[in-house]
Image: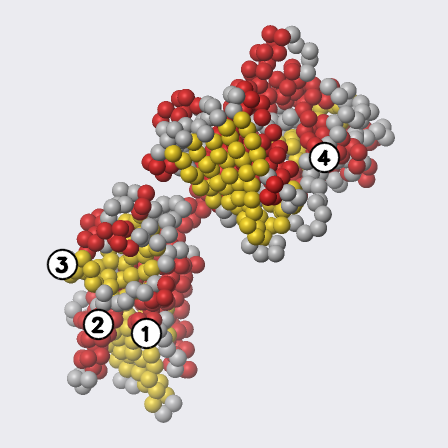
Amino acid sequence: MLHLNILYKITSDNALSFEQKISQLLNLGAEYFDLQIGIISEIQDDTYTIRYAISPDNVIEPNSTFSVNSTYCIHTLKAKQPTSFHHAGKSHIAQHPCYLDFGLESYIGAPLLVEGQKYGTLNFSSSEPKETPFSQTDLEFIDLLSHWVGNEIARNKHISQLKAQEKRMLHQQNILNEIGKLAGVGAWEMDLVKQRLHWSESTRLIHEVDDDYLPNLETAINFYKPGDNRDRIQKIVNKAMIDGLDFSDEFEIITDKGNVKWVAAQGKAEFENGQCVRLFGAFQDITKQVFYREQLEKRHLELTSALEARSTFLANMSHEIRTPINGVIGSLQVMDKTGLNEKQQHFVSLAQDSADSLLAQINDVLDFAKIDSNQVELESTPFEINQLLTKCVDVYNIAAQNKSIQLTSDFSKTEDIVVLADQTRIRQIYTNLISNAIKFTSKGQVQISSSIQRLSKHRTVLKVDIADSGIGMTEKQIQFLFLPFRQADVSTTRKFGGTGLGLSISQSLAKLMKGEISVQSKEGEGSTFTVEIDIEIQKGALLKADDPISLNTNSDLSKIRVLVVEDNEINQMVVSEMLNLRGIKHDIASDGLLALEKLSTESDLNRYYDLILMDCQMPNMDGYQATQKIRQLDSLTAKIPVIALTANSMKGDKEKCIKSGMNDYLTKPIEIEALHAVLEKHTAMS
């Protein structure tokens, strides 16, 4: 919407020269598409001539000529519609002369028509590839922009012709007629002395009147649509007759044949002896331009609505999937603590591994969807780099030992460095790469090393290399490595499993942290993945981030009372058994209303729970509403810690819980250790 407003402002600004408008339109397009170069070309036969251009340091000179076949625009001309390439080097045009000679990675262009005739192209390009393909909205915008540029070229062409002829014209009527003939813009003149109104031929055509129709001052206003349009033109004309200021605006008119059109009206007043004696100006049919603008605005609203719908769908999917998974994994965790025999333990372990694998697949899909819809919000907490890296490596020691792989690490260059960043997402990147290195290595070793490169006093680039002696990859396989739902080889999924999303997610997360993941590999000789991310160095001592799992889980919790608010019966049983493992007394409420009743009953008996475990999505009254009501009860009840048990993991969910009055946040599927740790944390504080 902002760019459409700027586009209209540029083209309607009469104070700008033609060259200034063209320059601003090219700059607008370059800014919109985030590309370096903007060109308006004229194409005659096989000759491509640059007429107007913007580029870094003005290296592209107007009037330079090329063979049209050596430019990307040949594809635009053949398609007769907007075309684009977001990464030429990795597309079917990688051998195109334009790519080989100039190294242009990204391009978007549209045919340029002037008065309905082929003129050339409007195109934008850059030596840098785009992260994602150009969207349909991008193609629609350059198509709209090309129409405006074509109109401006036509207007300038005719105005230039008009200026050349003005010197030879003696009568104002001839000048107005020539405007209509040459520029396709109607002219009008209102003689206030003689009380006469004149329309040029083009103005008459716009109004769709008969050849013998004679416009007059009294009835001309009736062509404007009743209401706002008619009121505005009257006010504008009256104001111009009083203060003499030029005017320009857009209106809807109803032609003599009953057709509705959008027109741009411009006018100027002429005074003699302080009295307005004449008004004259231009009149242009802009129905198509308004249509394109409205379509683009409509498309923008549709896309916004679609994104909101997708966000809601993802939140619901996260809840609906994680809720039963919580029942499965929670039940297995409880069974694991009940003294099983060897065979039972074996089957429980198999079920846990399968459930964990299923959860990993689900998390990959949900993470990808969240990244794709801009639902990922990075946190910033202090942590020591080497502590995080060591934990990432330790997780895979057993997996490496089981495959007789030597897993080594060297973190000496990042010793005692504390940073502020999102350690959860950084851990996700590293564990994914280490897991892949072990997965695709059958013998030899996996080596992890770290280093930093200072950018400023408080910022640095953290570099981590994960090198393996595994199966390696070809150059062709590397090209598709970070694409979603793609793996290096079609046999990879059959042999090693996985969704093909891990590396795509990791690369996206790295880019969110102003970094990237690169890879060097040779088939049969292993691979080295390098992660570089921009992080902030923490000033002062390390501040311990909230990590309930790391707390002491051996304290006596048998004296506390907990209220579990959960509507799902299976999850009620799972959480109940998890609490029973530590001898924790508890009651269960199946929704927020029942929870409030229990709290009220206990308060009347002068008894209070030590902590409330609150599910977020429930019938009758959800966890957010229930928590807000709890915070309004008597002082002792209102102070009870409330811990969210939520299957949602979308952007803003944690903030929504805290804003409603909750004290902490556990995401389903819930781990026993995490649940016990958060109980210890908040009962110790109360």
Q: Select label 3 or label 1 by which is in front.
A: 3
Asked where in the image residue 399 lies, by quadrant, the reply is: top right
The amino acid marked with disc number 3 is Asp
Residue 150 x %, y % = 26, 63
Q: How many marks?
A: 4
The amino acid marked with disc number 4 is Val
* Residue corresponding to mark 2: 158
Q: Real-space Cα distance between discs 4 and 2?
A: 73 Å
Name the residue rendered at 77%, 38% in the picture: 638
Image quadrant containing the N terminus: bottom left
Q: Real-space Cα distance between discs 3 and 1?
A: 30 Å
Q: Select label 2 or label 3 by which is in front.
A: 3
Q: Residue furthest left?
A: 45
Q: Look at the image and name its color scheme.
A: secondary structure
| Label 4: how many Cα within 10 Å (few below 14, some 14–19, many 20+) | many
Q: Is residue 178 left or right of residue 263?
A: left
* Residue corresponding to mark 1: 17
The amino acid marked with disc number 1 is Ser
Q: Select label 4 or label 3 by which is in front.
A: 3
* Residue corresponding to mark 4: 642
